[in-house]
Image: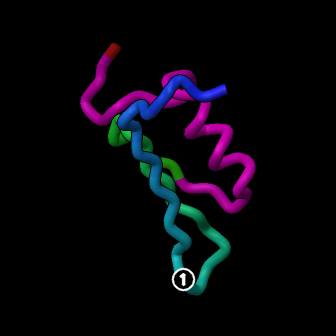
Amino acid sequence: MSTGPTGEIYRVDWLPGTDVLHGTCHCGAEHTAQDPVEMWEWMLGHPDGHRPPGDAS
């Protein structure tokens, strides 16, 4: 069930010539992975497992 737009933007780019995906979360954190499932689990697990750049907490 959706409660409406959240304004969160996730981006996944494929790095040509490789099997690597580069993901950018709406918070600005970045992650690379070869497995698309791993990439989406990382993104949708926000904020567990990643922090925005410069976040020391």
Is residue 35 rendered to the left or right of residue 26?
right
31 is higher (above) or lower (below) than 42 = below
Total numbered badges shown on the rendered structure: 1
For the C terminus, the image quarter is top left
For the N terminus, the image quarter is top right
User: Residue 27: x, y in percent?
Assistant: 35, 35
User: Residue 21: x, y in percent?
Assistant: 58, 63
Which residue extends farthest left? 54
User: Residue 37: x, y in percent?
Assistant: 74, 49
Q: Which residues are drawn in magenta? A: 32-56
7 is higher (above) or lower (below) than 56 = below
Q: Residues within 10 Å of mark 1 (few under 14, many from 20)?
A: few
Residue drawn at point x = 43 percent, y = 34 percent: 5
Does the magenta-highlighted stretch encompass residue 50?
Answer: yes
Is residue 38 rendered to the left or right of residue 54?
right
Residue drawn at point x = 38 percent, y = 40 percent: 26
Residue drawn at point x = 52 percent, y = 75 percent: 15
Residue drawn at point x = 63 percent, y = 49 percent: 39
Q: How is the image coloured?
A: rainbow
Which residue extends farthest bottom? 17
Badge 1 marks a residue whose secondary structure is loop
9 is higher (above) or lower (below) than 5 = below
Mark 1: amino acid: Pro
Quarter-wise, where is residue 8 in the image?
top left
Residue on which disc 1 sits: 16
User: Residue 3: x, y in percent?
Assistant: 53, 23
Q: Which of 31 and 5 lies nearest the eye of the viewer?
A: 5
Q: Which of 42 and 2 lies nearest the eye of the viewer?
A: 2
Q: Which of 7 and 36 lies nearest the eye of the viewer?
A: 7
Does the magenta-highlighted stretch encompass residue 57?
Answer: no
